[in-house]
């Protein structure tokens, strides 16, 4: 038995195990007053509404803290466009937040989103967690595209 255990231990040393462990992702629905936050499960298969935080001067620090507590290294933010497919006025602020999070060491992806807050309200009614649910819709759209076998 000890010989078998030794064999498997040496065998495993040849692999980069950092990439074999599941990883959570964090989703963001950015708003000028409130920011919805969602977190994926450990296998990055589905998104769950997490919280809503106020958009204040401490926003980046609060997002970083949530990400670190949930072992998140990648963040998905909604890319806000209008009916014509052009960037909304809030898009400049989204890109600024993206840059700030990247300087903290996170990999940040933009996921096209359109009317996710309205969709979230239709699903659950308007309440304090609607922005977190919108973030979950954004994150889920990204996760679905990243699943093996999905053609981009």
Image (spheres, rainbow, N blue to C red):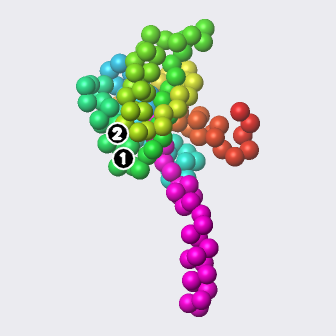
Residue 135: give x, y in percent of width and height: 47, 32
Query: Left or right of 70: which side holds 1?
Result: right
Most extreme residue toward the left, as rendered? 57
Residue 6: give x, y in percent of width and height: 57, 83
Q: Residue at x 34, y 25 (%)?
A: 34
Query: Left or right of 73: which side holds 81?
Result: right
Element type where label 1 sits in the image:
helix
Q: How much space separates mark 1 and mark 2, taking CA atoms?
A: 6 Å
Residue 1: give x, y in percent of width and height: 59, 91
Q: Is residue 124 visible?
A: no
Magenta residues, start to end = 1-27
Q: From the image, which quarter does the C terminus lie in?
A: top right
Q: Residue at x 53, y 28 (%)?
A: 110
Tag 1 near tag 2, CB within 8 Å: yes
Up the image or down, 20 lies above or below 73; here it is below
Query: Left or right of 16: which side holds 30?
Result: left
């Amino acid at each position: 038995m000890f010989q078998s255990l030794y064999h498997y231990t040496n065998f495993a040393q040849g692999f980069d195990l950092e990439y074999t462990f599941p990883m959570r992702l964090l989703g963001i629905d950015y708003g000028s007053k409130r920011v919805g936050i969602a977190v994926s499960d450990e296998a990055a298969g589905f998104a769950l509404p997490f919280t809503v935080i106020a958009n204040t001067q401490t926003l980046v620090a609060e997002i970083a803290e949530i990400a670190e507590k949930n072992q998140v290294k990648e963040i998905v933010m909604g890319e806000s466009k209008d009916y014509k497919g052009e960037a909304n006025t809030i898009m400049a602020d989204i890109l600024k937040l993206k840059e700030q999070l990247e300087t903290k060491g996170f990999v940040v992806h933009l996921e096209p989103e359109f009317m996710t807050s309205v969709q979230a309200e239709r699903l659950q009614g308007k309440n304090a967690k609607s922005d977190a649910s919108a973030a979950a819709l954004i994150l889920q759209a990204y996760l679905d595209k990243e699943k093996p076998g999905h053609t981009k």
